Image (cartoon, rainbow, N blue to C red):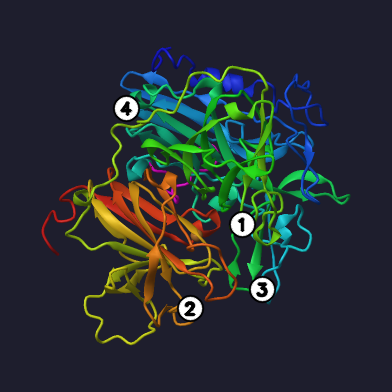
């Protein structure tokens, strides 16, 4: 069989046989347990399993991290081809938990990592072999009067919750989107073009973009929060010569860390059953709190450990959780290791030079980051990767914000071993450039997107706006009118043009153009905003006083006003496809306690077609989504005016 290159000798068929070997249960190289027949690995390093937080039952650091299987496409003359089969499988995620029924790509969770080479056009046949109804029990809970200090979502099981109607019977339709892939609208996995079991989605990908980590996941309209949660997510790696020349850690020293969170049902005796539970808190009757589940998985293993050598590693970290934001820190003896993460790449590729993360590595749903970590100073010691909250000591819990168990995973550093001669290259991508002032469009007004909450659907709203040239006749507040006073004192008046997915007139963009988009967050929580058919540079993050917004009317009584410039995180200084539009610091209780953020991005549109832009919190995706059209040059005017 012809292959893409000497380094990709495995056909999809061969890979599939490998994946299927071992039967229906995807194996976990784990300690002896009721659910694994595998022998315990020889464990000569430090470290042992530890109890997790109260009522979470499962031990931490009991199972080794596993790495998703790799799929390499096969060459077919001028392009590469790959078949990926979706199927229902029972997956081991912890050695003391029964196998978890999931919807998967190729029987594994996360799905296999698709390894590709830049410039090799790729055609993927996504085959839907899924069976059964959604393997997730969806529930909500809540009391009139406000959120609970220790919400039920911190704990396993469905006690005290209501079942969400209509979810148990969901059939496995699927629409696969390769997040961050620059491909035309016809191949992007349009969320309404779902395919039924027995059918296939054929998608072609130019695969001609900088080396980076993308990820593929289900995007079926209305139900992606359940289908992705059921297991439909995996990594897609693109490599190129520029990256290869850097000599970055590779092989077993290059490790993907796919983060997600899940919850499970309990049986009558209080034991975990392995049945997936999706549980959200309703605040009064008007707002669904951001989804968060108590068990953190890395590469599909709950709180794993990884034995590492005292040397440099490269980690490709992807946040594939439905909504949880990870603020990652590396702790040694309970203390944060400053500069532990050296950021070398972002959503869309390598940056110019390594940047140390001094505080937390802040990764919201959909974002990826490429980091280097040096373990050579920690011979024979245990390090922990933890999730943190602003205002909470690193490593401590915060039940109010669904952080009952902050630990993510453990690194067991070998006492012996060579550190090697690797040092991070001073120059990573010689072709990477931050946009200069003259690169930015100056002759067109920016696009405005305002995030307002809560709306009529229990989640915030995404408002597309247009500038009002003459605001003289307006009185404030007025529904759908938002005024913004920027850092220079300039007042801009905006009028809402669209809100629901099927409202008229989508943003229409010329192919190859660059536009300035401004995201203004008027809500009390951060939202990761994602644009299909595009990539962007984050230009600025600014803190705004948004207390002048009248939620009852739905407009500003006083303009949203710039308070100060904010900081971009190191991983926000590269090319991206998803950006956190935050709340300018710690979320404080009360309607007026949260300053907003204005995030400005310069977006480029290298491909053509109909896509969407949306919030990547999957619980918001169904409602905070708008179509987006990128047109070929001249098409909008051909044939004259009507
Ligand atoms: Cu959102």
Q: Which residue is mark 4?
A: 119
Q: Secondary structure at mark 3?
A: loop
Compared to residue 562, the image places residue 271 above or below, namely above
Residue 331 is a magenta residue: no
Tell whether label 2 touches label 4 (CB within 8 Å).
no
- State which tag comes first along the sequence, 4 or 3: 4
- Rounded to the nearest angstrom, the CA distance separating label 1 from label 4 is 38 Å
Q: Quadrant of the C terminus?
A: bottom left
Q: Work out whether residue 450 or residue 273 is closer to the camera in this orientation and state it.
A: 450
Q: Quadrant of the N terminus?
A: top left
Badge 3 residue CB within 8 Å of ligand 1: no
Q: Work out whether residue 306 or residue 186 is closer to the camera in this orientation and state it.
A: 306
Q: Residue 475, located in which quarter of the rendered image?
A: bottom left
- Rounded to the nearest angstrom, the CA distance separating label 3 from label 2 is 17 Å
Q: Is residue 439 left or right of residue 303?
A: left
- Rounded to the nearest angstrom, the CA distance separating label 4 from label 2 is 49 Å
Q: Residue at x 50, y 67 (%)?
A: 460
Q: Which residues are magenta?
A: 188-201
- Rounded to the nearest angstrom, the CA distance separating label 1 from label 2 is 23 Å
Q: Which residue is mark 3?
A: 146
Give the overall secondary structure of the magenta segment: loop
Residue placed furthest toward the left: 640
């Amino acid at each position: 069989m012809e292959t893409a290159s000497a380094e990709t000798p495995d056909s999809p068929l061969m890979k599939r046989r490998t994946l299927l070997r071992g039967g229906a249960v995807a194996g976990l190289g784990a300690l002896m347990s009721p659910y694994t027949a595998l022998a315990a690995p020889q464990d000569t390093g430090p470290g042992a399993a530890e109890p997790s937080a109260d009522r979470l039952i499962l031990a931490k650091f009991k199972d080794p991290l596993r790495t998703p299987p790799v799929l390499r496409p096969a060459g077919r003359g001028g392009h590469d081809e790959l078949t990926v089969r979706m199927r229902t499988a029972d997956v081991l995620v912890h050695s003391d938990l029964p196998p978890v029924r999931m919807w998967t790509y190729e029987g594994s969770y996360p799905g296999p990592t698709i390894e590709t080479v830049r410039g090799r056009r790729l055609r993927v046949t996504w085959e839907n072999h899924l069976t059964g109804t959604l393997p997730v029990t969806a529930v909500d809970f809540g009391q009139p009067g406000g959120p609970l200090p220790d919400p039920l979502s911190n704990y396993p099981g469905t006690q005290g919750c209501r079942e969400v109607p209509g979810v148990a019977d969901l059939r496995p339709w699927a629409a696969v989107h390769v997040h961050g892939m620059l491909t035309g609208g016809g191949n992007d996995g349009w969320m309404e073009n779902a395919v039924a079991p027995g059918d296939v989605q054929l998608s072609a990908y130019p695969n001609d973009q900088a080396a980076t980590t993308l990820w593929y996941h289900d995007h079926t309209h209305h139900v992606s929060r359940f289908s992705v949660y059921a297991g439909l997510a995996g990594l897609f790696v693109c490599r190129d010569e520029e990256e290869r020349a850097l000599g970055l850690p590779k092989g077993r020293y290059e490790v993907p860390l796919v983060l997600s969170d899940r919850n499970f049902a309990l049986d009558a005796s209080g034991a975990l059953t392995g049945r997936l539970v999706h549980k959200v808190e309703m605040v009064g009757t008007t707002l669904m709190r951001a989804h968060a589940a108590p068990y953190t998985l890395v590469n599909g293993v709950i709180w794993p450990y990884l034995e590492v050598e005292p040397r440099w590693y490269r980690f490709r970290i992807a946040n594939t959780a439905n909504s949880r934001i990870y603020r990652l820190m590396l702790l040694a003896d309970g203390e944060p290791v400053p500069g532990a993460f050296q950021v070398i790449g972002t959503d869309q590729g390598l940056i110019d030079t390594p940047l140390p993360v001094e505080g937390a590595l802040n990764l919201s749903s959909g974002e990826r980051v490429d980091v280097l970590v040096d373990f050579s100073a920690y011979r024979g010691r245990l390090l922990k990767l933890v999730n943190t909250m602003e205002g909470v000591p690193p490593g401590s819990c915060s039940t109010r914000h669904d952080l009952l168990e902050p630990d993510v995973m453990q690194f067991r550093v070998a006492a012996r071993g060579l550190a090697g001669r690797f040092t991070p290259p001073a120059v990573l991508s010689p072709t990477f450039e931050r946009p200069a002032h003259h690169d930015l469009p100056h002759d067109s007004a920016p696009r405005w997107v305002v995030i307002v909450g809560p709306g009529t659907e229990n989640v915030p709203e995404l408002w597309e706006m247009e500038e009002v040239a003459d605001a003289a006749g307006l009185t404030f507040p007025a529904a759908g009118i938002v005024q913004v006073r920027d850092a220079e004192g300039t007042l801009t008046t905006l009028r809402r043009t669209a809100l629901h997915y099927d409202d008229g007139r989508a943003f229409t963009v010329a192919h190859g153009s660059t536009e300035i988009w401004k995201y203004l967050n008027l809500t009390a929580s951060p939202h990761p905003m994602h644009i299909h058919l595009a990539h962007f540079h984050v230009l600025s993050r600014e803190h705004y006083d948004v207390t002048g917004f009248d939620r009852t009317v739905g407009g500003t009584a006083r303009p949203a006003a710039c308070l100060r410039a904010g900081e971009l995180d190191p991983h926000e200084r590269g090319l991206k496809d998803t950006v956190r539009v935050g709340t300018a610091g710690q979320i404080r209780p009360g309607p007026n306690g949260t300053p907003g953020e204005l995030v400005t991005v310069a977006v480029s549109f290298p491909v053509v077609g109909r896509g969407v832009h949306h919030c990547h919190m999957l619980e918001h995706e169904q409602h905070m989504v708008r179509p987006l059209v990128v047109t070929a040059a001249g098409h909008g005017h051909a044939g004259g005016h009507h």
